[in-house]
Image (cartoon, rainbow, N blue to C red):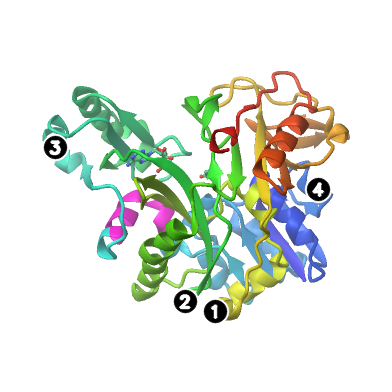
Amino acid sequence: MNILLIGSGGRECAFAWKLSQSEKCTNLFIAPGNAGTANYGKNVNINPNDFEAVKALALKEQVDLLVVGPEEPLVLGIHDFFANDEAVAHIPVIGPKKEGAILEGSKDFSKQFMERHNIPTAKSKSFTNETLQEGLAYLANHATPIVLKADGLAAGKGVLIIDNNKEAQDELQLMLGGKFGNAGSTVIVEEFLTGIELSVFVLSDGKDYVILPEAKDYKRIGQGDTGLNTGGMGSVSPVPFANAEFLNKIEERIIKPTVNGLASEGIDYTGFIFFGLIKVGEEPYVIEYNARMGDPETESVLLRIENDLVELFLATANKQLGNYEIKISPKNAATVVIVAGGYPGEYEKGKAISGLENIRDSYAFHAGTALEGGIVKTNGGRVLAISSVKDTQFEALQCATADAARIYFDGKYFREDIGFDLI
Ligand code: AMP
Ligand code: GLY
């Protein structure tokens, strides 16, 4: 089969690594990919949001399967575009249509969806410019901290946690005034939940689902989980505090009602559902849905999936997940992300990367890298995801952290404490 994978991050590099291992994979194309994905297939430099270009590539290379990594093309309707175009309608797409991707594309929709299906989540209320005065009054008496969320996609920056009522009122005005563009034209005011977060993933074929290994990601830039939020500085899988009883609660109270709820609303969801969860006491709550896999969770999760990924995707596309047996390794995976100096603020690109050949026992999944004149250079904030899989979590963490130290580029930074809080 010829497979086209959309995206250019660490998640896609891990997907490319795993897809390329399948005997069913004849040719793998990655659009646009990075210096790492080029090790597993052919990069094609097109913009994933240019659906005409994606279609032209799919036709030219006789693609049999389209796998969409990031959320943006999904929210913009890449699956709908393929389904509605006769020339490419036969190509199955892993990733939901617009009507499903809205779970991530609109937090207001997802909160209402959870309410309709009785799925545990923080209490909330939405406001727009028309209801600004009501929103200000609501905020005046709200318990602190207060969580404010822009409804739409805001590149991971649309969630603010504010300690003071007056500041929250000012922020609501700024958000509704266009601070996040259209994404903030509806703002959700949410109760703050105190607990520990984890990520749970399923692959859904629209009626059945398989549960993938759970993971925990580390969002803050600084050691000890301090400083600014990032796209993710590392991950571990499994998650020690997610025991069988807790995972069972997640399946019964969150996964089943979500998959059944989508089906009952006529949404044919073919793709990943990422449940961003928080454990409050012993109870799971949904913080957010994403319509894709997590990054850097994927890098750890895929190291524990023993199935052929192409077979898993075909079972998804053919709505055969009900009979599919997912095989998960009992081993422990850990990922440490190496970022560019300054990230998540301003940072420079184009720094030569050395030491990749010195890695001993980890995978180096590339995130923000590019090949320039045969040299691997930095090309983003999150540069490399160093992942290791071992019998114990301690060994996996030690190995990934030690291998991350073997890589060098000007301004390089990584957290040395990923996962160690859990053991
Ligand atoms: P999101 O973009 O929805 O994942 O939110 C970003 C981060 O904000 C989450 O990973 C949480 O750490 C935090 N967060 C979001 N909503 C809440 C909430 N209701 N209570 C506590 N923390 C939250
Ligand atoms: N690691 C969190 C995310 O992918 O959104």
Mark 1 element type: helix
Query: Badges 3 and 4: C-beta atoms under 8 Å apart?
Result: no
Give the amino acid at mark 1: Gly
Give the amino acid at mark 3: Tyr
Q: Is residue 113 above or below residue 389?
A: below
Q: Earlier in the sequence, mark 3 or mark 4?
A: 4
- Give the residue number, with chain letter if any, for mark 1: 322
Name the mark nearer the viewer: 3 or 4: 3
Left or right: 266 as drawn, with respect to 170:
right
Q: Earlier in the sequence, mark 1 or mark 4?
A: 4
Residue 328 seen in the figure: yes
Residue 38: image tag: 4
Q: Earlier in the sequence, mark 1 or mark 3?
A: 3
Name the mark nearer the viewer: 1 or 4: 1
Q: Is residue 409 above or below residue 15?
A: above
Query: Badges 1 and 2: C-beta atoms under 8 Å apart?
Result: yes
Residue 207: image tag: 2
Mark 2 element type: loop
Mark 3 packing: few (<14 Cα in 10 Å), some, or many (20+)? some
Give the amino acid at mark 2: Lys
The residues bearing labels 4 and 2 have C-alpha atoms spaced at a distance of: 35 Å
The residues bearing labels 1 and 2 have C-alpha atoms spaced at a distance of: 8 Å
Residue at left 31%, top 40%?
A: 193
Quadrant of the snapshot with the N terminus: bottom right
The answer to whether residue 111 is magenta is yes
Residue 271 seen in the figure: no
The residues bearing labels 1 and 4 have C-alpha atoms spaced at a distance of: 34 Å
Q: Earlier in the sequence, mark 4 or mark 2?
A: 4
